[in-house]
Amino acid sequence: MTLKSPIEYGICTNWDDMEKLLHHTFYNELRIAPEEYGVLVAETPMNPKANREKIVQILFETFNTSAVALVPSSTLALMSTARSTGVVVEIGESNTRIVPIYKDYTMTEAVQCLDIGGRSITDYLMKILTEKGYAFTTTAERDIVRNIKETMCHVAVDFEAEMQADSGNNTKSYELPDGQ
């Protein structure tokens, strides 16, 4: 069985799978009757109009939600800081977006999108580990590498200072599911 996300680069590419994912989320994870709730959809700032219309259609017609609000995820991120103006850098699984916002308005003409994200970092870590003799080929093994990335790696606030302070003794151990 192959599992594949219905979302690629922040855009839904498989609506049948998205509908199944929503069904599972409402009924199995949240255990709610969606018709009793409104839904807030955090969307990518560059979401095509056709995709916006499709998600609203599914939520209203298939799940009978009482209300739907589409809000750019970058706007929600900035709102969480109690600010209405700023620049949000969103790093997702497949891309990174730099989104300028002025008084709660996304300046769409200035949004920058790079096709590099968490998956790129996981791929690079897999490459490094493969060069050291480890083999990660299945989806489950890829998840192990993703977990290593998320639990063992960090972003240096001041790279130069960390490199100067590095004593060369910063080894961390990670136990693989098979006990290695």
Image (tube, rainbow, N blue to C red):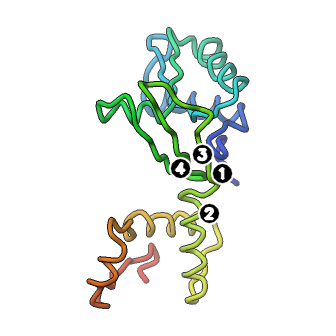
- The total number of labels drawn is 4
Tell me, for residue 112, which label it has, or none.
Answer: 3
SS at circle 4: loop
Q: Quadrant of the C terminus?
A: bottom left
Q: Along the horizontal axis of the image, is 63 left or right of 79?
A: right
In the image, residue 55 above or below residue 176: above
Query: CB under 8 Å between callouts 2 and 3?
Result: no
Residue 51 x %, y %: 69, 27
Query: CB under 8 Å between callouts 1 and 2?
Result: yes
Callout 4 amino acid: Gly
Could you give the CA–CA distance between mark 4 and mark 1, rounded to whole angstroms? 19 Å
Residue tagged 2? 139
Could you give the CA–CA distance between mark 2 and mark 3, rounded to whole angstroms? 30 Å
Residue drawn where x is 62% and y is 41% of the image: 10
Residue tagged 1? 3
Callout 1 amino acid: Leu
Residue tagged 4? 92
Q: Check disc 4: other Cα within 10 Å, few if <14, some if 14-19, many if 20+.
A: some
